[in-house]
Image (cartoon, grey):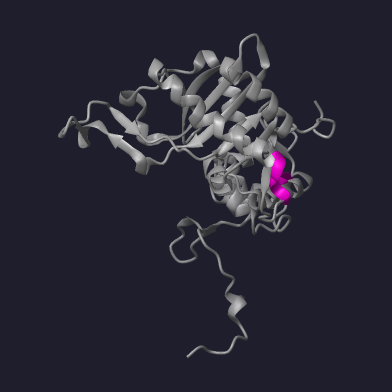
Amino acid sequence: MDQQAREATDIFLWANNTDGIKKELDVELFLFNKNYTPYSTNFASELNAQIKPLFLYDILGFVTMGAGTGLSVRDFELSDGEENTLLRTDLEKVGRAETLLHLIEHERHDIVEFSEEEHEFKRIKGIAAKFTLKDAPEKTFYIIKMIQQGSVLKGATSWEFRDGKFGAFAAEVGFKLPNDNQVLIVDKDIFVFNQSKFERLFNYDYKKQAIADARVTEIENQYKLSFPEGLTLQDMVRERKKVITKLQKLEVGGVTQEQAIEYADEMQLDLMTDDAGAIIIMDGHDLDTFVGLINEDYMTSQITGKRYEIKSKKLLDESEGEPPRG
């Protein structure tokens, strides 16, 4: 559905309706790592009494109480730290969250069960609880929490205290589940209860991303590029933190298409063009190289002839005319 035509979820109506069916909801838990690869998990029946209170009930209580105390919903990107405000953004703006949910919803056959031996809990970034009403998939929603590695206990190095004495920690891994409200995803809306944890969970920095998006538009207008079918420059940039950072100060247009191609050949960089003269961007490595080229990040030493990638640049004439420091 077109984004402009879609109405955002009424979170107060959602909370009211969900409160009426909360006992009928099924729950699945997924762990996901720093690459946003999800893993399925099982849980013991005795946790049934804890999962909904820890994940869902506090969120419902917060929103329901907020309805009576003037809680307002504000777009994440327009927020300025107002009090008594719940932040919301579009799922499609947060690429990593969208990818995670897509894998769970549409690539379920490829999701494997988590194993400490194969996947290592120290690589886990968060836990997602998927709530579903039987025979009503449209009522599915997700509550996601970040896992702090500082709260993780490894069996080999931990003790437990039981019946008045210390003993070896029996489990492979133990961790304290955060009890604060963090992130709720309903339909195509993300509701942010904890801004800092949301940003860290999905590496989402709106201001940086907004600047990067603007630079992407400028690049698309300035250069002819070719991508694999189904991929766009925007898609690839959003998955490259290094590129997003570099785009913050990039002045698009300083290097022309022809100069970039000649520059790549001169520096013996692996960047190709198609029959129409478009620069081929097949993967993240190609994207890094292309952005490095138009940012003039490569040089050949006039003394040794060696080729270098410049990590930090400062124009020598920037300091001309400045008074001496002493």
Q: Residue furthest front?
A: 68
Stretch in magenta: 67-78
**On the rendered image, what quadrant is the N terminus found in?**
top right
Q: Is residue 321 left or right of residue 176?
A: right
What residue appears at the point 59 percent right and 21 percent down from the top-left corner? 22
Q: Is residue 84 visible?
A: yes
Q: Is residue 116 above or below residue 306?
A: above
In magenta segment, residue 275: no
Q: Residue at x 35, y 22 (%)?
A: 115
In this rendering, position of residue 244 left or right of residue 163: right
Q: Relative to 69, is 312 above or below?
A: below
Height in image: 82 above or below 107?
A: below
Between residues 298 and 228, which one lies in front from this camera angle? 228
The count of marks equals 0
Among the 4 quarters of the image, the one containing residue 224: top right
Picture residue at 36% right of the left edge, 41% below the top: 151
Camera-side residue of 28 and 319: 28
Q: Nearer the viewer, residue 161 or 122?
A: 161
Q: Is residue 71 magenta?
A: yes
- Give percent across and percent down for residue 94: 64, 38
Farthest right residue in view:
5
Q: Residue furthest top?
A: 135
Residue 238: give x, y in percent of width and height.
Answer: 62, 41
Residue 272 shows up from this direction:
no
Query: In the image, is residue 120 above or below residue 24?
Result: below
The spot of residue 32 in percent (x, y) is 47, 30
Instruction: Point out residue 176 in the picture as x, y percentages from the top left corner.
Output: 38, 36
